[in-house]
Image (cartoon, rainbow, N blue to C red):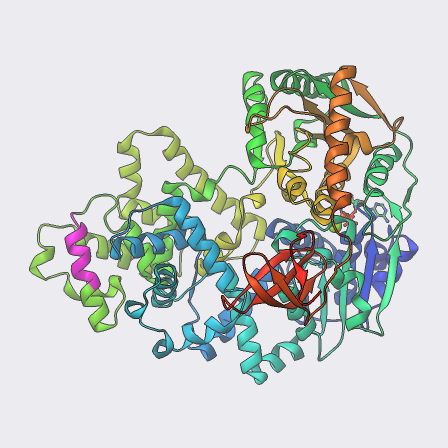
Amino acid sequence: MEQDLILDGLNEMQRLAVTTTEGPIRVIAGAGSGKTRALTNRYAYLVEYLGIEPSNLLCVTFTNKAAQEMRRRVKKLIGGERDTGYISTYHGFCVQVLREDIHHLLYPKNFIILDTEDQKTILREIYEELGLKLNDSKFNRNLKKIADMKVDTGYVEQLMNPNEVIDPAEIEDQDRKILLMYLKKQKRVFGLDFDDLINFTFVLFQRYKKVLAKWQERLHYIQVDEFQDSSSKQFELVKLLSEQHGNLFVVGDPDQTIYEWRGADPKFIVNFEQWFPDCQTIFLNQNYRSTPEILSVGNSLIQQNKLRVEKSMFTEHPSGVKVVHYHGKNEQEEAKWIVERIQTLVKKQGVNYNEIALLYRSNYLSRFIEQELIHSNIEYSIFGGFKFFERKEIKDALAHLRLIAFGDDLSFLRIVNTPKRQIGKKRIEFLKERAEAEGLSLYETLQRYVDHEIFQRTKAREFLEAIEAMKLKREELSVSDLLQDTLQATGYEAYIREDGDQDRLDNLMELQQSVVQYERSIGEDISLEYYLQMLTLYTENDREDQKDSVKLMTIHTAKGLEFPYVFLVGMTESVLPNERSLRDRKEHALEEERRLAYVAVTRAEKELYLTESEGFTGRGQKKYPSRFIFEIEEGLYQRVGVIEEEMEQEAREVIRVARRIQTNSEREAKYEEGDRVEHPVFQIGTVQSVDERKRVYHVYFEEMGVTRPISWNFKKLTKVGA
Ligand code: ATP
Ligand code: MG
């Protein structure tokens, strides 16, 4: 009877994937073939039929939303009371490892997780200390540099050992000085950013073999979804963890790799046997998601990619309606047409709004549609663009909770004087100096000096009392009640109320509501720490979507999801494919864009609309339909709206020219590692490595003592002596 739930309703190959439990296994299959379903049922199978404890199972998915969804489905199969702790994202799992073992790296277990906003707060402080002008674009550059530095894990040792952090005062170069100051401050608040989470876990495992052995021993089975988008660090991590028991199960679709730009590499799934010679491979080829019409459009498109392995997919779904390409004369027309279509679907076909998704290449593209949706009174939710948790009042409110849980400086600075408590710059300086000298946090320092004359006529004492009172209550209250009580006790809610900004008040209420909802969805008591950690790892993509509203999101966000009705909007050349992929003249960048279009197309179950319009892009270029539309075999879709003959000629010419440039680019490397080459500006150098994917040589130039990436296409790079 029970067996039915888990194994029935799977096809033969899926069943094979579910019941093959030992050793390394890879499942390669196209979109909608039931990979995620197989992975979920396999988890339940391991628990129910092999008697494996969930605490011995690691299951990695790509987003928090996917992890939550998987947890929900697994619970349905194995019963709600079972703990399913290790179903998480890579980052989420690293947090779990570190909460348990980070003390080996001389960090406290209640370290805080820094998101981009927190990182900027730290930079702001540094800029102030150095007397530099605050500048958001510089911050972004600094953040990029910080991320670049953290590609390597060497800095972790520096962070662990305070004596090893070089004194920034001694550094001349300003960028480097900022970097070092950043590390120092990060250490002071015991904060880890997203890169650190993975790096610290690595270093922990490298240095402490016993810790590694413990985790290896614990994780008898490891499963990874969307494996094609794993970066090399993420791959190394699961490889390392599976070394003891050797049970690594990965599923993915190389055609859906859309994070190469962030380090993902499909070779880990494509060449899986290189690392796991005795692996088994299972292919799934029945599509359960889409109509044959949608499936053919997807196939027709992805077949244009050269770097791929052909898969043949079939569906038993009955034929549906033809895919539509809509071409409008301008953006307004495009938006109007989409909204009319939506209304027809709802009114004539009885479709619910939440069965409809609008997908686009970049966040900014939502705006023109939003206007029209608002105008027509259609409810919509944006996933990914609308930064709810980055709003000031939300960050403030959460900083209260963080201060209660961790007592960290960042949260303290954020709220100590909001609402005004007369604790301004001068008094903060006072606290900072004392804190530095006495090795305390700012909060502890305030506790120690609250009777000092400098705090007379301030509301420092009331603030401390409110926070302390909440600390006492935190064990007995649920997180949602704690939040509510805290905002009342500190006067923050009253402050927002008096401010009279209804939006901000609404947002606070929405936050309260979201905590309640979260508690309900988990169905267990959650600790304050757990909630805060979930939030920091939680991106906008994961917002609850229970409302009956149209969903708007980028294609990246839609990964792994499915919707009955999909509109892929703004399908304009230089938008999708994007400008950069065309400018780069690199085939692989264009192919990633094509995969992105393929991911979008394959989200649709019943009906698919591809839309675009004439006019000009933000950069003032004339807009043409995307080459991807022309690539789809004619006859597989129906066109609404007229593309004038002239327009089509021009569009095809634009694409032809771009293609010619691309095909003229070098396909083979001329030089190999160790070759001595000459450059007109950088002079003599040695090829250190050849990057096949990016088609560049990394050349070390002696004169300057630096390594630079040089394009294969650069004709003026010649062989020395040739
Ligand atoms: P993607 O590559 O987009 O992540 P996927 O391969 O993970 O897709 P799933 O999301 O697991 O595909 O499945 C697609 C849809 O097909 C889901 O609605 C799922 O419930 C359904 N499905 C999967 N397997 C079967 C099956 N054997 N019988 C009926 N429906 C199935
Ligand atoms: Mg999936």
How many numbered callouts? 0
Farthest residue to the bottom: give it.
210
Image coordinates of residue 669 in percent, x first then y, are: 74, 59
- Magenta stretch: give its range: 422-432
The residue under the point 27% across, 48% down is 489
541 to the left or right of 22: left
Image coordinates of residue 711 in percent, x first then y, are: 65, 54
Query: Front-most of 244 and 277?
Result: 277
Q: Is residue 429 above or below residue 248?
A: above
Q: Is residue 290 above or below residue 27?
A: above
The residue under the point 71% across, 52% down is 73
Residue 470 seen:
no
Magenta residue check for 688:
no
Query: Front-most of 438 and 52?
Result: 438
Q: Quadrant of the C terminus?
A: bottom right
418 to the left or right of 662: left
Image coordinates of residue 336 in percent, x first then y, are: 64, 16
Farthest residue to the left: give it.
453
Q: Quadrant of the N terminus?
A: bottom right
